[in-house]
Every structure is written in structure tokens, then in C-alpha cells.
Amino acid sequence: MKYIQTNILLQFDNFWKLFTLAALLRLPGLFMPYWYDEAFTALSTRLPFERWVAYLVGDVHPPLWYILVWPLAQLTDSEWGPRLPAYLFSLLALWLLWRIVAHTQWPGGYMAVVAMAVLPFWVFYASEARMYSMIAALVLLAYYAMLTGRPAWWFIALCGLLWSHNYGMFYVAVLWPCAVAQWHTERRRVVEYTTLTVLSGALFAANWLLPVTLAQMLTLSGGYWIQPLTAGQLMQNIFYLVVGFTVPPELLALALVLTFAALTWLVLTGVQHWRSLPYGWQGVLWMTVGVGLLAQLVSMAYRPIFLFRALVGCVPFALLLAAWALQVSPRPARWMVGAGVMLVAAIGLGRFWLEPPKAEAEWFLSGLDTVRSEWQPGDVVLHASSASTIAWQTYGVDIPQRLATPCDSWDNYGGLSRQTIDAIEIPEMTVEDAMQGRVWLAVGLGPLSNPCTKPAIMPILERAEPVAVQYVNEYSISGIWLYTPGNAVTEYDYSQEVVCER
Amino acid sequence: MTDQYYLWLSKIALEDAGAVSMAAFGAMIALMFWLAQFTQPAWRRWLYPLYLAWLAVAIIAMIVVGFQAGQAACEVGL
């Protein structure tokens, strides 16, 4: 080993044991059914090139993730294909954090590496067919490149961030001052890193920002789904970033209390011992809070864009600060905080495996089996709105589908844009025309759906029989119903549809 | 916006209040333990066991209430 390790957990053999454990913990998630955003990724891999471009231009993110996923998804129709890059990036992020800890000799850093290996937040995103693990890996790669003086990797990481997610701009804006501060005594290095930062930004702007991102901002100007950040959401977001969102609702209060008790202890201890903070702590603190601050500033100036999962690249740095604060805590406190965090992590991991959030798709897949087994010639699947089209096009593309003609404007918060729907190429059909024959009605309406959609589909919904229902309550209607011409109107008693098995 | 949207916002507000309360409760627990280290050793001999016993009772209470509240929330469609 090149470095003299200060802790036995970070010795080469022990790290690879931890790495193997992390790899095993992340495996089961690769084979679970997709949730909505993942199905969006999977569907993108099945479109021909021209429609693939149109599909993505109608969405909010730059294309790097979709470019990486495409060849892997050609190898298999199984869920693990589009998820494999996330799995590999998650493990790469773990390795990079280990290298950063080893390089900086960060006090207590081994605890940050252990936390990243086992916390449910990281396990979840390692098996999500989205770009978040990649963002974490690229941020850590940029930081490691900066620490070790590798400008080529710095440039690649920054370009990768800019092409992965709109938050990439914030990450670059936060990473650059770190590099300047790191190399402020070496003018040549400052010029080098600044040039590469500006160059990566310019390349991004020329190829994606100007022609596409501005168009995306205009497309979404009427209907972006993120709500303004409140104090409660901030607390929830911090909790999600530390622990993840797989804690069962029954234990959520306990998990929140334990997590914030641990965090408060660490902050108080950190403030108490701030004079013993390790070298480079300013950069680590800036990486922890900088992106969130920028996102909140933009939210106040433009529109709400604060998205907790996009802060995934800040979490490793928060873990480093937490690990240091734990290291300087008295031994009993260290054990108590560690035990509390591990208890919450075990609860979250247990739920992830035993009752995974992604298994919400199970109701849909069983409904799809019913549709296939009871399909009759002339039947049609009618989507009440664009929300249900992604899952159906991913898992049931062989079944003829129509989209109910939108009731007025395309002002559908959180739904697909007109461009993306056009790229999927689902023909439209009015509710009246559909009611001439048997209809499998696919509904995915939430509180942010277009207000006119529910009244528009009521003539068919109130005469249909439920096939597979996910939600029917005051806020959401989600499920599959079968309409047969001549059915009488049935009064829906929504309270009867709520199933409580807990 | 629909009535559902405003109903949903009120649910979110309820969740917000819950999250802030739980975070504040957790912060208070940490603050109690943290402040205890500045007390006299004689105080600490009984303060820490008292805190730990109280924490154990609070954890059990949160588990019991959590399961009851989860069932109640599900039955009203939350």
C-alpha cells in the first residue's frame, strides 16, 4: 500500500471485504420491477434514434445516462440491463470515497465508507435505472482528481456531470472554487483547472444547453411538478439523503427522531471541536452544502427546483464531516450514535428487501396478466392521461393502446410533455369513441394531474369494473378498469377501495 | 387546481408538521445528552441512566404509536 492507513478498516483487504458486502447488498434491487422514472429510462432504450432524441428533448435531463444505458438494454429485456450502470457507478463511488479518505487521511473516514456501503439510500440508488449513482461517482471522481492533480479526469468528470443532470451545472459551479482554493498557491494549476472547467461548461453549452435546455425550460414552464421547499420537506429531504425512503411508515417517526438526534449530536460535537477539524475541511463543508444552497437560490429566483435526490453527490462529503464528528465524540456517544444509525439503516434495508417500494409495480404486472388472459379481439387499452403510458409501453407494448384525447391544454404537472408523448407514438382516441367497444381503462391520476381529466373519463370509469387497483382515495386514482358496453353506472364508494393490510 | 390538490396540500402540511416535530424531538434528545457532559460528575452518574431509561421508553412508545397511527392513516386513505 502506498499510504500508511490509520485505521484497520481501511486496510486493503478489509476494504475489499466491505466492497464485496456492498456489492451483495445492492444485487437484489437489480431484479425488482421498475418504478415510473426507471420505466421512462427503459422505454427510451426501445425507441429508434429519431424518436429517442425527441423523447428525451421533451424531458428535463441531458442525455449521457440514456446513451450509456442504451447498449446494455439491447443485451437483455430484463430489468437488470438498464440498472447495471447504476450498480457499477455506485461501487465506483464507494471505491472513490475510500481513495479520498486514504489520500486525505480523513479522521474517522472509514466510518463514512462503511456508511456509504450499507445505508439504504445508497443501496436503493445503486439499483435504480437513473443517473443518481453516476452523479455521485462523477462528483467524487472530480474531487479525487482535484486532490491528486489529475486534470484529465477532472475534465471528464465535469463534462460527465454537465451531460448527466441539470444539477450538473450546480456541481461544476461548486467544484470549481474548491479547485481554485486547493491550488491557490500554484498559479499554473489554478489556470489549468479553471480553463478545463470553463471548457467543459462551454462544450456543454454549445451542444446541449442552448439548443435543448432552453427549449426544455420553455416546454416545462407551465407544468413542472416540484413544489416549493418547506421546513418539513427540508427535514424529510435531509432524512431521505441520510437514510433513504424505504423506512416503513409505522417506524418513520422513530427513524426520524433517531436520525435527527444523531445529526444534532454530530453538529453540536462538530461545533464544539471545530478547531480540530482536519485539513481541507472547508472544501468538504462547501461540497456538502454548496449545491443545495445554489438550488434553493435558483428556486427562489426562478421556480421550485429543489430535488433531494439530485443532491446525491453532496452526501459523501456530509458523511465525511459526520464521520469526523463521530471520531471526536466520547466513546459511549460514538457507540450510541453508531448503533442508532445502524438500527435505522437495518429497518430501511429490511423494508427494501421484504416489501420494496418498487413492488408497487406488482399490482400493475398482475393486472397486465389479467388483461392478456381475458383479451378479446377489438379490445383497446385507453390511457386516461400520459401517466400510465410509460409502464404500459415498457411492459405491455404488444397490447393495442390509445391515449384519451387531452381535455384541454397539456398542463399536466409531473406528466410527460407533448413532445415525449408524440415520440412514443400512441394514437389518441376520444372517450366517446372508445366506449363503442370493450375498453381496458388505465388510470394514473394524482393531485397534480390536469383537473379536467377526471371529469372527462368519468363516463367510462363509473361504468367499469375494477381489474387491478393501486389507489382510489381523495388524492389519487390509479389502476386498471374494464368497461363493457351497456354496463350500468355504479356509484363508487371510494372508502371501500382502501385496503389496509398492515 | 382541483379540490384533490388542495386536500393533498393539507396532507403535505400535516406531514411537514410531523417531520418538523420529529426532527425537533430528536434534536432535543441530542441536546440533553450533549449538555449533560458539562455537568458535575456526580450529576452525570444519575443523569445518563435517567436519560437512557427515558429514551428507551420513548423508543417503545414511538414504535407502538407508529403502528397504531399507520393503521389509522391507511384506513382513512392517507
Image: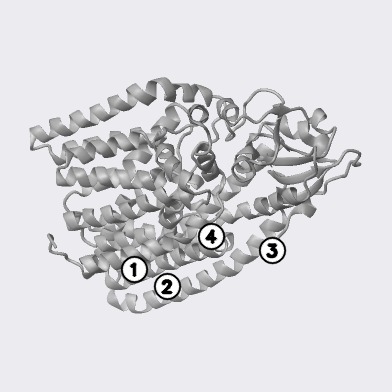
Rounded to the nearest angstrom, the CA distance separating label 1 from label 3 is 43 Å
- Where is mark 1, residue-wise? B36
Residue designated by label 3: A501
Disc 4, disc 1: CB below 8 Å? Answer: no
- Disc 4 crowd rating (10 Å Cα; few below 14, some 14-19, many 20+) is many
> Label 1 is found on which chain of the structure?
B
SS at circle 2: helix
Mark seen at residue B51 = 2
Q: Which residue is mark 4?
A: A252
Residue at the spot 40% in from the left edge and 64% down from the top edge: A24
Q: Amino acid at mark 3?
A: Glu
- Quadrant in the rendering for residue A272: bottom left
- Residues at discs 1 and 3 in contact (Cβ within 8 Å): no
Residue A62 found in image quarter: top left
Question: Which element is circle 4 on?
Answer: helix
Q: Is residue A294 left or right of residue A70?
A: left
Q: Nearer the viewer, residue A229 or A439?
A: A439
> What is the x, y in percent for residue A416?
58, 32
Label 4 to label 2: alpha-carbon separation? 22 Å
* Residue A443 x, y percent position in the rendering: 71, 41
How many residues crowd mark 3 within 10 Å: few (<14), some (14–19), many (20+)? few
- The chain holding disc 2 is B
Q: Is residue A46 above or below residue A240?
A: above
Q: Amino acid at mark 2?
A: Tyr
Quarter of the image with the N terminus of chain A is bottom left
Quote the CA–CA distance across marks 4 and 3. Answer: 18 Å
